[in-house]
DNA sequence: GGAAAACATTTTAGGCTTAAAACAATTCGG
DNA sequence: CCGAATTGTTTTAAGCCTAAAATGTTTTCC
């Protein structure tokens, strides 16, 4: 490795920390703001779902995944899509089967796999909730212009890619 | 109120739903992307905190609030800042007092109020974790240019304001 | 002064969430 | 074909989280 005058790009994080304790305050503030927005909106949606439909947000999210998959999904699929642990899905599904919103059966070709689907009731209820949910989201983002929305989409796509890359660096 | 030809801005959500079932798919996609980014980063940070320091994210967050308040905070303050329920803070504080990171005392002037502070140990441990935490965040956002960061900050500020306004509309 | 409202916190009941270990079924490589 | 790795799910133990009710304290305002 040749000598470097401008070396920022080449140093690993340890070296950085020793030689140039860089300031990452902007990124930190950005992260906190991102978290604040999400927490704020999530809390609002959670409360409205509870008051209007007496349903929890995780239940709604799970039904949303299934609504997009008419042929059903495996628990693993759901777990990956929702970005939650496997065990979490097990319990969530249990309660939704219990309440008649989901149908669960063991795959015929692979007896490890559980396939879940929305029941007729589950689909009907979800559609009803989803329609209203969409208006809440629109209202929560109402002050953003279409251009703002596009720009945020673009920047968040970049953020997602950056974070995934960073995560992959540590867990190759 | 005069007659309107372009009436979008004037209709309430019920009228909208009946007359012009508008498409809010873009806002919905934006919300899902925002949520994905946050979940991704949050999960990454949670895992690193656990592996490197054997600490949970909520504990770290609570200590971060207290680090900014040398004179301590009341439980209500903490609860508002962290945007979590009061009861949640009670339990969190209990465990952190138990492990020697926090000091809690009843206010002398108002016996309803509990004031909590970081202990010496708590502060030292937090500072050590925070330094490393900052590099993780920087790395997670590494592919964003300074301009991207500024632009995201701006758009998220607008998003936060919009969401707060929407929340206030329903809960005046 | 004293009842009523407001406030800060805790408790309660239930659900969500995770990481890790355990279990079960399938696939892979020799 | 058979043992070993892999995959899909559940279980376990612990902690997080919420909404609502309960408790104790202070303020308000007649």
Image (cartoon, coloured by chain):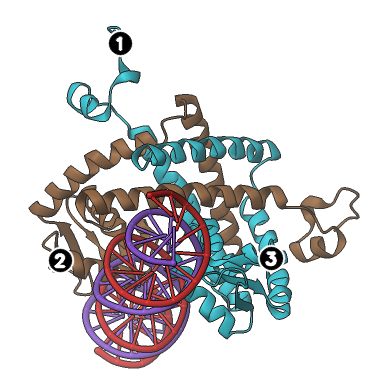
Chain colours: A brown, B cyan, C purple, D red
Report which residue position mark 3 lands on: B67
Q: Earlier in the sequence, mark 3 or mark 1?
A: 1
Q: In this picture, is A163 found above or below B30?
A: below
Quadrant of the frame with the C terminus of chain B: top left
**Residue A61: % across, % down:** 29, 54
Q: How crowded is mark 1: few (under 14 residues within 10 Å), some or many (20 or more)?
A: few
Residue B137 in picture, x, y percent from top left: 64, 57
Residue at numbered disc 2: A97
* Residue occupying the point 13% across, 64% down: A99
Q: Distance between the residues labelled 2 and 3?
A: 45 Å
Do discs 2 and 1 belong to a common subunit? no
Q: Position of residue B112 (x, y in %)?
A: 51, 70
Between label 3 and label 1, give the one nearer the viewer: 1
Residue B166 lies, with reference to residue C5, above or below; the image says above
- Label 2 residue SS: helix
- Viewer-nearest residue: A82 or C28: A82
Tell me: A147 left or right of A80: right
The numbered disc on residue B1 is 1
Q: In which quarter of the image is residue B66?
A: bottom right
The N terminus of chain B - image quarter: top left
Chain at tag 1: B
């Amino acid at each position: 490795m040749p000598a470097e005058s401008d070396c920022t790009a080449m140093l690993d994080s340890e070296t950085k920390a020793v030689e140039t304790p860089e300031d990452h305050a902007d990124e930190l503030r950005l992260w906190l703001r991102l978290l604040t927005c999400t927490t704020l909106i999530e809390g609002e949606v959670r409360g409205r779902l509870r008051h209007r439909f007496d349903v929890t947000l995780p239940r709604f999210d799970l039904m949303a995944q299934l609504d997009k998959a008419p042929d059903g999904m495996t628990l693993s699929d759901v777990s990956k899509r929702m970005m939650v642990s496997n065990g979490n899905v097990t319990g969530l599904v249990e309660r939704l089967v219990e309440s008649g919103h989901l149908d669960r059966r063991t795959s015929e070709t692979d007896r490890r796999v559980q396939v879940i689907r929305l029941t007729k009731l589950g689909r009907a209820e979800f559609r009803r909730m989803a329609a209203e949910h969409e208006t809440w989201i629109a209202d929560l983002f109402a002050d953003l212009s279409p251009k703002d929305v596009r720009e945020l989409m673009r920047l968040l796509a970049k953020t997602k890619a950056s974070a995934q890359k960073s995560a992959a660096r540590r867990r190759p």
